Image: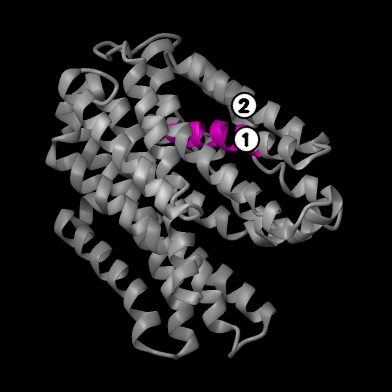
Amino acid sequence: MPVLLLALLATPTSLSANSATTVIPDLARELHVSTADATWTATAFGWAAVIGAPLTAGLLRSRGPRVTVLVNAALILIGTLLVAVAPTLSVLLAGRAAQAAGGGGLVTLAIGLASTPQRTGAITAGIGLLGAFGPLAGSTLSEISWRVALCLSLPALLAVPAVLRRVPAHHAPGEAGIGDPVGLALVLALASALVLVPRFPLAGLGFGAVLGVLLARHVTRRPDGFVPRSVVRSRAFRVAATVACAYSTAYFALLYTVPRLLQPHWSAERIGVTTLITLAAGSTASLLVTRYASRLGPVLVRAALVVSGGLAVALPLATTWPQAHAAATGFAVFAATAAMAWYAGELGKATPTAHRSTALSLFTLCYQLGGAFGPALATLLIS
């Protein structure tokens, strides 16, 4: 399947997610709610994007790729229609959640269909690059209406007809059916609890701990269920999931923290332009590294990820130089998107066919959790 088609399927979700950051005041004013209440649109989107991954894994194993594509596309379409006409905040939240669940599912699908680190790298680099333009797109389109700015998931549907013609209607040979709704429900509940930790720390952590124990016991009782015990116990999965979550958390934390660090030194326009440049540079570097990963070799790729991730965290802590702070976002997006591509490929090679789609979906879930943890960490750092 053409990688540009997969990129079109996956990247609009990141654009739609980041476009909301500049339209919160407008939607709060029109819907007659407080700005604090309006920020729930971002929380709802982040939560639903996270749960889109396990939902897609369940659909893939029970209904096959074609139905999964159609369900996620329908969620985006229904969600966009709700956003376009929402008379109240609750309807808007439902629309944004549907958009995000469908978009998160399409990201999971695209990564699963990519099949090689190079192709996955093109997708993740596109996600990082297009996401960088989200705030600019939001502020520009809000001149027409804030509702238009929140409908940027819709272009993903342009890829759906071509994808449907290329994916099988049923399971690939050797893939396992789901047969474990309890396991799926526990994963969804645990992901939801973790996403709510930033807003409700004690309740989120408490429920998360209880659900984690229940899920661990369930995996022991159902080793071939929705969360295969062989997958979560494998070193390849544990390493990939940890790295993806850590680098994603750092990236999203810096995305919110660095502009605040730059405010005493630069104008808002310069901050915006510089952020775009650094994120574009980091995403492009990620694309190049994953494209030529086979020539570079695993040792050099891993070293590049460790060094860039370390610089992303160290530069804001070790210096007050604004250029270094700005560069940190470039290193962060490189580490997050390149790690996503590299470890997805490594995990795919290390996982048996029967559990590959589930392993990649759970891996994507861990990456997307960083989108919830990162802003919470940023709030602690800048408060």
The label number, if any, that marks residue 99 in the structure image: 1
Q: Are marks 1 and 2 in contact (CB under 8 Å)?
A: yes
Q: Quadrant of residue 190?
A: top left
Dot 1: within a 10 Å radius of its alpha carbon, few (fewer than 14), some, or many (20 or more) residues? Answer: many
How would you classify the magenta stretch by its main secondary structure?
A: helix
Q: Is residue 8 rendered magenta in the image?
A: no
The quadrant where residue 114 appears: top left
Residue stretch in magenta: 96-108
The percent position of residue 46, horizontal first and vertical second, equals: 53, 46
> Which residue carries the number 2 mark?
75
Q: Nearer the viewer, residue 141 or 192?
A: 192
> Can residue 368 be spotted in the picture?
no
Q: Earlier in the sequence, mark 1 or mark 2?
A: 2
Which residue is rendered at x = 35% and y = 28% of the image?
186
CA separation, marks 1 and 2?
6 Å
Counting from the top left corner in percent of width and height, residue 133 is at 62, 59
Say what amino acid the circle numbered 2 marks.
Answer: Leu
Of residues 269 and 197, the one nearer the viewer is 197
Q: Nearer the viewer, residue 12 or 297?
A: 12
Q: Residue at x 36, y 72 (%)?
A: 312
Q: How is the image coloured?
A: one colour
Instruction: Quadrant for the N terminus, please.
Output: top left
Q: Secondary structure at mark 2?
A: helix
Image disc number at residue 342:
none
**Against 258, is 292 above or below?**
above
Total residue callouts: 2
Q: Amino acid at mark 1?
A: Gln
Q: Is residue 309 above or below residue 297?
A: below
In this picture, is 338 found above or below 275? Answer: above
Q: Within 10 Å of the Cα at label 2, are there few (<14), some (14-19), or many (20+) other Cα atoms?
A: many
37 to the left or right of 198: right
User: Where does residue 71 sit, x and y in percent of width and height?
Assistant: 56, 20
